[in-house]
Image (tube, grey):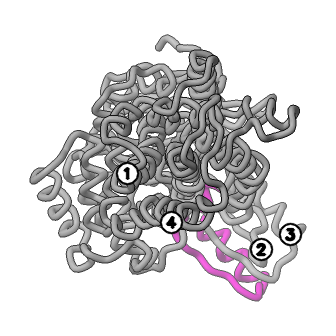
């Protein structure tokens, strides 16, 4: 019999080269959606309660102190400024934690990825299904915040609907960052390192709770370079887009692509030796 | 042939783990990989179902190349991995139902297939249980049921009974026999020689990633050892060594015993000779795969 040669590199092999089918991605995504569905009441608490608590706390607590804020050269009601930032934070935390913690558990503890990869699904399909599920969690959180903001009179329904493409881009970006974390860490505790070094500073400094231009110059530059800053700026489009918005969009897109590719290349060798 | 492996190699850095393994497996046949821990069994099986990328070589499953047509190949195979990878987020029943969806089996068809398999493996009373409520033996049964969800033509069982109690192992063996009778090709890795001897039509003995011998269990035993062996206690090795030359047979110490293959001619003479040396213990038994492994590798299966 003739012998085929296959060089053992992290991206060689059928799983890496096989085309992605919508059915395969959906099957992987659906597995997670079913688990979520079974415990939807518990699962829907954080995305609903967090923005509600923040909006109530900031609405009744901080607004009388802050009043209006200056954003993009105009005076804006603080809660109207805050609401898009809250949506961005929902995207950040829900997508990242699903990609990092939950995917890591499925990858390393439960070996769910290993089990599914013995079926006709390919690595690319399972990876994409996981990424889209992490993005779905971010979307649920952001849309729950958006609906609350609509009821609060801070946003129109149209604004929320038209923001969906941006929310999806942000959800994919942070979901992929979470998956990258899951691929890099070797113990679940190590997830705290990027969480506290990157995610929490991003959450506090990127202009979600206050305009970034109040920050000192070097910190302003660093905060503006982070993807949450671009997402928050873009989500505030009803309040006026900054001059650099096309760059912000491209920057966010670049983060999404880079995080996805890096996550793919990091997780693949953990499954195929 | 439902499975053909051709010159499989796997190296990690400079270290070869599997070296030129070739074999084939027919439908309705149970082929066993017998070897100590670290012999390369799991790596080889990983290459067969696509979890390990071969450094060289080719695997064909029912005519589909696992490396280039993996999706088609995996459609007709089932895998029981060594580690427990049941889905703890689902009930016993849903573990099967949702796994079926990965093969495109959904709705009523998936439910019916899941119910049928739970009955086949004797888990119908546990269908609503969570996976973490099952014992080790019940979990292995569920893993096997899951591997059969797509009615595979080929099943890989990687150390399926490790850690199971004797009753659970017997149950598992019965299920494997049923698979064979149903015409399914089964590849089994094990380090239990009784399991290999009981279930396998043919065996590949692996050591250091190489096939050191192959054949039916009985052929391997007869060609390597013979029909019987004698176990001697209490005689010194230098007393026994000359006998091996004299009777043209093989022997070696194993723990507290000295094991001697009974030669085709002169077996009774050897027995009488040993009896007259007044050993502490002397017994004669049928040769088994453990003896074969010992002769071929110099180790018992447990030693490694």
Q: Mark 4 lies on which chain?
A: A
Q: Can residue B114 be seen in this view?
A: yes
Residue B266 in the magenta stretch? The answer is yes
Place residue A255 in its image quadrant. Answer: top right
Foreground disc of the pair 2, 4:
4
Disc 4 to disc 3, how far (Cα)?
87 Å
Disc 4 to disc 1, how far (Cα)?
13 Å
Q: Residue at label 1?
A: A153
On the image, the x and y values in percent for residue B261 come to: 64, 61
Disc 1 to disc 3, how far (Cα)?
94 Å
Image point (48%, 39%), residue name: A131
Read off the magenta span.
B265-293
User: Mark 4 Cα within 10 Å, few/some/many (few <14, many 20+)?
Assistant: few
- Determine whether B224 is above or below B133 in the image: above
Q: Is residue A115 visible?
A: no
Q: Residue at label 2?
A: B255
Image point (31%, 60%), residue name: A37
Q: Is mark 1 on a helix, strand or loop?
A: loop
On the image, the x and y values in percent for residue A232 come to: 58, 37
Q: Residue at label 3?
A: B237
Q: Which chain carries label 2?
A: B
Foreground disc of the pair 1, 3:
1
């Amino acid at each position: 019999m003739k012998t085929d040669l296959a060089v053992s590199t992290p991206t060689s092999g059928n799983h890496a080269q096989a085309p992605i089918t919508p059915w395969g991605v959906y099957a992987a995504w659906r597995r997670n959606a079913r688990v979520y569905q079974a415990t939807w009441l518990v699962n829907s608490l954080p995305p609903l309660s967090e923005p509600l608590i923040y909006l109530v706390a900031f609405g009744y607590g901080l607004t009388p102190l802050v009043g209006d804020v200056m954003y993009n050269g105009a005076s804006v009601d603080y809660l109207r400024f805050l609401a898009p930032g809250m949506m961005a934070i929902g995207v950040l935390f829900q997508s990242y934690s699903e990609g990092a913690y939950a995917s890591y558990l499925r990858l390393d503890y439960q070996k769910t990825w290993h089990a599914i990869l013995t079926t006709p699904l390919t690595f690319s399909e399972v990876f994409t299904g996981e990424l889209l599920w992490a993005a779905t969690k971010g979307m649920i959180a952001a849309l729950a915040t958006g609906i609350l903001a609509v009821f609060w009179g801070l946003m129109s329904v149209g604004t929320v609907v038209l923001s969906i493409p941006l929310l999806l881009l942000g959800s994919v970006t942070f979901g992929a960052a979470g998956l990258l974390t899951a691929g890099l860490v070797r113990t679940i505790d190590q997830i705290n390192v990027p969480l506290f070094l990157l995610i929490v500073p991003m959450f506090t400094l990127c202009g979600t709770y206050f305009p970034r231009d109040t920050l000192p110059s070097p910190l302003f530059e660093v905060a503006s370079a982070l993807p949450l800053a671009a997402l928050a700026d873009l989500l505030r489009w009803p309040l006026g887009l900054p001059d650099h918005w096309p760059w912000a969009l491209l920057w966010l897109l670049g983060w999404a692509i880079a995080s996805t590719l890096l996550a793919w290349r990091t997780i693949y060798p953990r499954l195929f030796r | 042939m439902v499975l053909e492996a051709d010159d499989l190699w796997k190296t990690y850095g400079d270290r070869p783990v599997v070296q030129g393994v070739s074999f084939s497996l027919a439908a309705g046949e149970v082929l066993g990989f017998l070897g100590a821990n670290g012999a390369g069994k799991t790596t080889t099986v990983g290459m067969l179902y696509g979890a390990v990328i071969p450094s060289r070589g080719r695997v064909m499953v029912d005519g589909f190349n696992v490396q280039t047509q993996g999706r088609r190949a995996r459609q007709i195979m089932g895998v029981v991995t060594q580690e427990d990878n049941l889905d703890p987020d689902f009930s016993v029943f849903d573990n099967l139902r949702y796994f079926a969806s990965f093969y495109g089996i959904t709705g009523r068809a998936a439910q019916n297939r899941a119910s049928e398999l739970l009955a086949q493996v004797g888990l119908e009373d546990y269908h609503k249980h969570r996976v973490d409520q099952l014992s080790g033996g019940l979990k292995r049964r569920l893993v096997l049921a899951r591997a059969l969800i797509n009615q595979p033509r080929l099943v890989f069982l990687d150390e399926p009974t490790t850690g199971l109690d004797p009753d659970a192992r017997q149950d598992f063996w019965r299920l494997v026999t049923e698979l064979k009778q149903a015409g399914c090709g089964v590849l089994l890795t094990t380090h239990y020689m009784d399991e290999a001897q009981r279930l396998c039509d043919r065996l590949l003995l692996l050591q250091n990633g190489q096939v050191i011998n192959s054949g039916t269990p009985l052929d391997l035993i007869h060609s390597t050892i013979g029909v019987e062996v004698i176990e001697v206690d209490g005689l010194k090795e230098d007393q026994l060594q000359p006998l091996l030359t004299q009777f043209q047979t093989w022997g070696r110490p194993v723990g507290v015993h000295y094991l001697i293959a009974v030669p085709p001619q002169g077996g009774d003479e050897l027995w009488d000779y040993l009896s007259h040396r007044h050993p502490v213990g002397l017994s004669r038994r049928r040769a088994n795969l453990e003896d074969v492994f010992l002769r071929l590798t110099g180790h018992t299966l447990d030693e490694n």
